Image: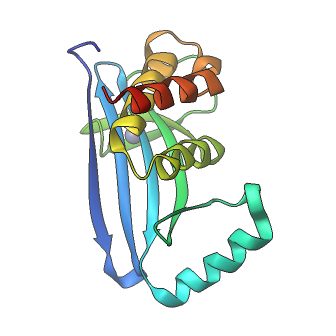
């Protein structure tokens, strides 16, 4: 991995809403990519999402880890420079870039990536590896279609199995 990008994870409790926000990120000279998920900590709300999970099956935005529901919120791309993609949104204060960004996001991408996390028993290293791939696809190589295909997920699973 290039030395000029770095990855990490932060968590913060949103006590009034009975949840905890998990944020994984990769930052570099061209911007950042981030995955945001909300861990539901309030028992009454957990029961609601249990029903949602059963009804929606594979279409559910909920992934479960040790009986706790996690909601996939957003897989975001934050660009330091305005690109040629028209559907980005200008954000004056980006928490990842400490300045303005041009942002776009996908909730479906978040569902897919969060599912990898729960299926690997909450292994942050796998998510961060995939985010670094996503960063390169979105911000270095300019080919978003290469972002999070099944082969990338398979590669992460391989890394996990080999224990490196
Ligand atoms: Zn941003």
13 displayed left or right of 139: left
Q: Is residue 152 above or below residue 7?
A: above
On the question of residue 85 being in view, the answer is no
From the top left corner, tell me how far across and down residue 20 is, in percent: 36, 69
State the quadrant of the C terminus. top left
Q: Residue at x 65, y 19 (%)?
A: 145
Tell which of 158 and 80 is nearer to you: 158
Residue 119 shows in the view: yes
Which residue appears farthest toward the top when viewing the image? 141
Whole-percent x and y of residue 63?
Answer: 57, 59
| Coloring basis for residues | rainbow
Instruction: Give the image location of residue 2, x and y in percent.
Output: 26, 12
Count of all numbered marks drawn on residues in the image: 0
Q: What residue do we see at 43% from left, 31% from top?
A: 161
Q: Which quadrant of the view contains residue 18?
A: bottom left
Residue 86 higher or lower than 47, as above or below: above
**Nearer to the camera, 100 or 42:** 42
Residue 159 vs 1, above or below: the answer is below
Residue 64, located in which quarter of the rendered image?
Answer: bottom right
- For the N terminus, which image quadrant? top left
Q: Residue furthest bottom?
A: 44
Quadrant containing ligand 1 reads: top left
Question: Which residue is depicted at the point 61% across and 43% down?
Answer: 112
Q: Residue at x 61, y 21 (%)?
A: 151
The residue lying furthest to the left in this view is 3
The one of 132 and 158 positioned closer to us in this rendering: 158
Most extreme residue toward the front, as rendered? 162
The front one of 115 and 96 is 115
Please state if 7 lies on the left or on the right of 44 as rendered. left
């Amino acid at each position: 991995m290039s030395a000029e990008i770095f990855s990490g994870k932060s968590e913060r409790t949103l006590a009034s809403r009975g949840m905890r926000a998990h944020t994984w990120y990769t930052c570099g000279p061209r911007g950042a990519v981030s995955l945001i998920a909300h861990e539901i900590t309030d028992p009454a709300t957990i029961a609601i999402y249990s029903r949602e999970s059963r009804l929606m099956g594979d279409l559910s935005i909920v992934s479960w880890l040790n009986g706790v529901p996690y909601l996939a919120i957003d897989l975001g791309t934050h660009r330091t420079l305005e690109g040629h993609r028209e559907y980005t949104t200008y954000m004056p204060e980006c928490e990842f870039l400490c300045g303005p960004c041009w942002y776009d996001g996908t909730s479906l991408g978040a569902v897919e990536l969060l599912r990898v996390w729960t299926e690997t028993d909450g292994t942050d290293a796998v998510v961060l590896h995939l985010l670094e791939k996503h960063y390169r696809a979105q911000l270095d190589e300019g080919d978003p279609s290469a972002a999070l295909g099944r082969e990338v997920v398979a590669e992460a699973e391989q890394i996990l199995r080999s224990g490196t």
